[in-house]
Image (cartoon, rainbow, N blue to C red):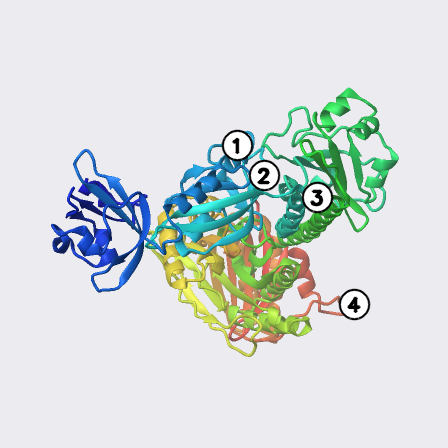
């Protein structure tokens, strides 16, 4: 008996907080509980064997239950209720002492509990400290929707989107805050139940929480309709978040069901799905090639007879109602009106009208005199017809969706234009030249839908050299793409002048400064750029950077490192010199030029990681396309990179020593004949006799002009590569000019002959003097 009364099992019970003591037949205390010690201040060792009447000031025996005042050890009186129970089978009496004022006893509490749990008007549920339902009344059980699971109460969700009912109950149990009149809706499929809940914490007499009580009432239909409308308007923020037309349609049906009805569908014409602008004005029949793209049912199962998602929608007879829809009108109809509209056609009825449809509401996706699609909402269980508020709500939702679709089309047009422009401006992904083979790769940013301003380029220069360029324009979209186009064109034009890399970037910096001055927002115009020139004869790479990361190189032995390029300021800063880095590379070296999207914002981590990846994946003889794909595939955010990732790979080649020949002549016109003889002999040794005649004439003209107008020494160089290159260098900086000589002129035809006999020709300047070069195509 003592162990049963002590409450030593843990958890809460009906006796928690109730003081208890055991009396012998003569009224002596034989057992004293801890709760009695807390109530009256006496320790068990102090009271055992003492008469209870003397100790408590209590008249014994007690008959049933009585309100009394007991003597505390400290001398004051404690109000309590006492109940005497037979201790059987052992002789004696158990006294239960409940603290109280003497006016609210166990009988009153029990009567109130019985009344609340047995009445059938207000639903009552009692939950324990683990928020498990322990007792309910019949009214609460009657609230359970048909077809709902056993845990339907746990599936309640706040109508204002603040959380689930379990989160509410946990807050009430934890804080003791009483919540009155909050509305929650059952979210299980096929249910339509909205409740108003009042929740408060249950505590035992000492104040220890023992659970939560919930009183629930069904929300009237009129208020439920108002709640549904308020919820629908709250969820309008979910509309228009996608630039995809199908995704926008799916977002719409998610809001419509079960807010307005049990079934909802969205049909879009094929021209919308194909990304074409809807035509202005009346498009003809409403069902001009429509297709169902989204559908939702309140019970989670779209009826099989109806048009399914992805299927074409049958053409409806063109009536005044449907014609009005095509220009922004709304239609409401019940089952009888639907039968008339569909001409009692059994096929159309099965495909377009739910079996148990009571009423329907249709609204177009219409904006700026363009029809984007059509929305239908059906009520199959709710007998109430759609009213003016329902119509206004659907029109508002459809208007928001139509605006989102129009924005999606605007974005699509700009995106497609930018993509076409960017792709047309970028070079082929792979190129082949005497100096190197190249391959480019581009990975757009996953977090931004716009096209960026990254670009790369690889194009031939004079004397078998190749230019390698990579850059990154600030921003995205058409503005960045247009700036990129101007910079790429400017780089190619300046490179044709054979400017050294540092001078080319200086001129490019001036151009970006002018572009920024012309822009509406000058601070938004800027770019970084790396320009490099590789000479396969000298096997030398010259590079300069304007705020761009240095290129990486993987040597034939597998060692990977960054070239010691010192980045200058980004383009557009102005009045800053750039530094040229010169390195000699063995044939077979792989250069990697990249934008900062490949290494990320944390350069201390991204740069070493890139070197590690290049060292692991770069293998001799591997195709550069495959190498680029592997490098991008190992990007930490390959699926959705934060920034555009651009990579240009180049594998260097070299011109063998036996494929070049160099001569130097003094400033003597007699040396022209020697130069012709040297060229003829060298071309014969290279088995290029077919090119001898034209080459002799060009060498004769160029060497003669150099000796006559520039003095000596004159250097002549031949290079046999994919083309035959002929160079004549002299110490003069005079610009050669191509002009048309008159019939009476004795000279002035030298450069004209050179231009006619060669495929390409030009002039470049060095630290001192100039070089005039020509190229002649060679047989494959």
- The answer to whether marks 1 and 2 mark residues whose Cβ atoms lie closer than 8 Å is yes
Left or right position of 678 against 295 = left
Residue at x 18%, y 51% (from the top left corner):
52
Neighbours of disc 4 within 10 Å: few (<14), some (14-19), many (20+): few
Residue at x 44%, y 52% (from the top left corner):
172
Q: Residue furthest top?
A: 346
Q: How many labels were placed on the picture?
A: 4
**Label 4's element?**
loop
- Give the mark nearer the N terminus: 4 vs 1: 1
For disc 4, the marked residue is 742
Q: Quadrant of the N terminus?
A: top left
Q: Quadrant of the C terminus?
A: top right
Q: Which circle marks residue 584 in the picture?
A: none
Residue 390 occupies quadrant: top right
Q: Nearer the viewer, mark 3 or mark 1?
A: 1
* Residue 563 can be seen, yes or no: yes
For disc 2, the marked residue is 193
- The answer to whether marks 4 and 3 mark residues whose Cβ atoms lie closer than 8 Å is no
For disc 1, the marked residue is 148
* Residue 586 can be seen, yes or no: no
Residue at x 20%, y 61% (from the top left corner):
73
- The answer to whether marks 2 and 3 mark residues whose Cβ atoms lie closer than 8 Å is no
Q: Which circle marks residue 275 in the picture?
A: 3
Query: Spatial distance from mark 3 to mark 1, Cα to Cα?
Result: 43 Å
């Amino acid at each position: 008996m003592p162990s049963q009364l002590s409450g030593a099992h843990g958890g809460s019970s009906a006796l928690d907080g109730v003081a208890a003591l055991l009396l012998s037949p003569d009224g002596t205390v034989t057992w004293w509980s801890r709760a009695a010690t807390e109530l009256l201040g006496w320790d068990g060792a102090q009271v055992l064997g003492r008469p209870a009447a003397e100790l408590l000031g209590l008249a014994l025996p007690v008959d049933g239950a009585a309100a009394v005042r007991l003597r505390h050890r400290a001398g004051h009186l404690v109000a309590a209720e006492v109940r005497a129970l037979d201790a059987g089978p052992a002789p004696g009496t158990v006294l239960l002492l409940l603290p109280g004022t003497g006016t609210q006893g166990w009988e009153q509490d029990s009567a109130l509990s019985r009344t609340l749990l047995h009445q059938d008007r207000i639903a009552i549920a009692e939950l324990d400290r683990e928020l498990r339902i322990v007792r309910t009344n019949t009214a609460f059980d009657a609230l359970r929707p048909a077809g709902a699971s056993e845990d339907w109460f746990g599936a309640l969700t706040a109508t204002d989107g603040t959380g689930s009912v379990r989160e509410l109950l946990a807050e009430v149990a934890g804080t003791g805050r009483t919540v009155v009149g909050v509305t929650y809706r059952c979210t299980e499929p096929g249910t339509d139940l909205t409740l108003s809940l009042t929740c408060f914490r249950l505590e035992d007499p000492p104040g220890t929480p023992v659970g939560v009580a919930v009183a629930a009432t069904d929300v009237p239909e009129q208020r439920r309709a108002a709640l549904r409308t308020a919820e629908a308007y709250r969820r309008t923020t979910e509309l228009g978040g996608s630039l995809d037309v199908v995704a926008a349609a799916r977002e719409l049906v998610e809001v419509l069901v079960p807010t307005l009805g049990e079934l909802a569908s969205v049909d879009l014409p094929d021209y919308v799905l194909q990304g074409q602008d809807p035509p202005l004005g009346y498009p003809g029949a409403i069902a001009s090639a429509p297709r169902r793209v989204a559908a939702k049912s309140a019970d989670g199962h779209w009826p099989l007879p109806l048009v399914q998602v992805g299927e074409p929608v049958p053409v409806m007879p063109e009536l005044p109602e449907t014609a009005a829809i095509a220009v922004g009108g709304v239609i409401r109809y019940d089952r009888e009106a639907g039968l008339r509209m569909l001409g009692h056609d059994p096929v159309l009825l099965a495909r377009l009208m739910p079996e148990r449809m009571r009423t329907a509401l249709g609204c177009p996706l219409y904006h700026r005199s363009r029809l984007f699609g059509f929305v239908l909402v059906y009520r199959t269980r709710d007998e109430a017809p759609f009213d003016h508020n329902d119509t206004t709500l659907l029109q508002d939702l459809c208007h928001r969706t139509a605006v989102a679709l129009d924005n999606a089309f605007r974005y699509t047009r700009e995106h497609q234009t930018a993509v076409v422009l960017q792709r047309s401006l970028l070079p082929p992904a792979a190129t082949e030249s005497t100096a190197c083979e190249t391959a480019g790769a581009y990975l757009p940013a996953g977090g931004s839908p716009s096209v960026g301003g990254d670009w790369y380029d690889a194009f031939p220069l004079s004397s078998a050299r190749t230019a390698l360029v990579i850059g990154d324009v600030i921003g995205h979209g058409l503005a960045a793409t247009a700036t990129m186009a101007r910079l790429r064109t400017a780089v190619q034009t300046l490179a044709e002048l054979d400017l050294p890399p540092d001078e080319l970037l200086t001129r490019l910096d001036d151009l970006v400064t002018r572009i920024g001055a012309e822009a509406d927002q000058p601070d938004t115009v800027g770019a970084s750029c790396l320009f490099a020139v590789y000479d396969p004869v000298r096997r030398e790479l010259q590079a300069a950077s304007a705020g761009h990361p240095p290129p990486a190189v993987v040597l034939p032995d597998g060692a990977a490192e960054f070239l010691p390029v010192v980045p200058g300021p980004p383009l557009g800063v102005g009045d800053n010199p750039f530094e040229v880095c010169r390195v000699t590379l063995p044939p077979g070296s792989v250069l990697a030029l990249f934008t900062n999207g490949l290494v990320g914002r944390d350069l201390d981590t991204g740069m070493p990681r890139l070197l590690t990846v290049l060292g692991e994946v770069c293998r001799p003889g591997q195709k550069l396309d495959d190498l680029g794909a592997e490098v991008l595939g190992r990007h930490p955010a390959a699926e959705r990179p934060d920034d555009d990732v651009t990579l240009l790979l180049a594998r260097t080649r070299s011109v063998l020593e036996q494929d070049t020949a160099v001569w130097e002549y003094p400033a003597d016109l007699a040396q022209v004949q020697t130069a012709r003889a040297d060229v003829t002999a060298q071309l014969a040794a290279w088995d290029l006799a077919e090119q001898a005649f034209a080459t002799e004439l060009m060498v004769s003209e160029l060497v003669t002009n150099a000796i006559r107008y520039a003095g000596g020494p004159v250097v002549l160089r031949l290079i046999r590569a994919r083309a035959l290159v002929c160079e004549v260098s002299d110490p003069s900086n005079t610009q050669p000019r191509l002009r048309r000589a008159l019939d009476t002129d004795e000279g002035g035809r030298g450069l004209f002959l050179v231009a006619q006999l060669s495929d390409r020709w030009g002039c470049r300047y060095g630290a001192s003097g100039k070089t005039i070069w020509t190229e002649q195509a060679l047989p494959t």
